[in-house]
Amino acid sequence: MAQAAYSYRDDSDVPLFDDTTPVAVMDAECALCSWGAQMIHRLDKRGTVRICPVQSPLGAALLRHYGLQPDDPDSWLFLDQGQPYTDFEAVLHACATFGGWARLALCLHLVPKPLRHWLYQRMARNRYTVFGHKDMCALPDPAFQKRLLR
């Protein structure tokens, strides 16, 4: 995934969007991802992180740009200053970005990267079975709705 920062700006398949703040590209139909989006909303005290559903044209295009598939449960993307982060590394980078209590998750760097990757894959591939479905975009909180890129 070694591409230049903001490489998606030169990709005609990626719609233009405001990329001045971090963007989390997540599955809007997964209960675990919906919980994760709510945690972003709570932990990001500056209110800068935007959330983009993988089901949206923008979310799908961003994933494809980085060689990820929108319908692949392993696909989770966090863009910060034009740099992509995926799977567990995306979670850890997001937590570092939020600061405060979220930084406690950084202790997971002590877990070897291959094990973190394996754990992420197992959780991602079984998320519907274990956690079920939930529509993130239907959450009624107006402040949360302002974060969504559709």
Image (spheres, grey):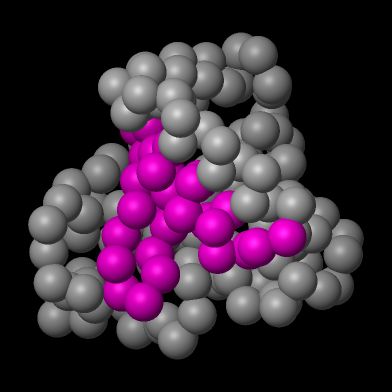
- Total number of numbered labels? 0
Q: Residue at x 31, y 74 (%)?
A: 82
- Residue 99 vertical position relative to residue 30 in the rendered view, above or below: below
The x and y percentages for residue 84 are: 30, 60
Residue in front for this viewpoint, 107 or 37: 107
Left or right position of 150 against 84: right
The x and y percentages for residue 150 are: 54, 69
Residue in front for this viewpoint, 103 or 55: 103
- Residue 62 vertical position relative to residue 7 in the rendered view, above or below: above
In magenta segment, residue 99: yes
Q: Residue at x 36, y 77 (%)?
A: 81
In magenta segment, residue 9: no
Q: Residue at x 58, y 53 (%)?
A: 95
The part of the image, by quadrant, that contains residue 138 is: bottom right
State which region is magenta: 72-100
Residue in front for this viewpoint, 12 or 88: 88
Q: Is residue 73 visible?
A: no
- Residue 89 vertical position relative to residue 93 in the rendered view, above or below: above
The x and y percentages for residue 142 are: 85, 72
Q: Residue at x 79, y 59 (%)?
A: 42
The x and y percentages for residue 10 are: 14, 81
Q: Is residue 104 visible?
A: yes
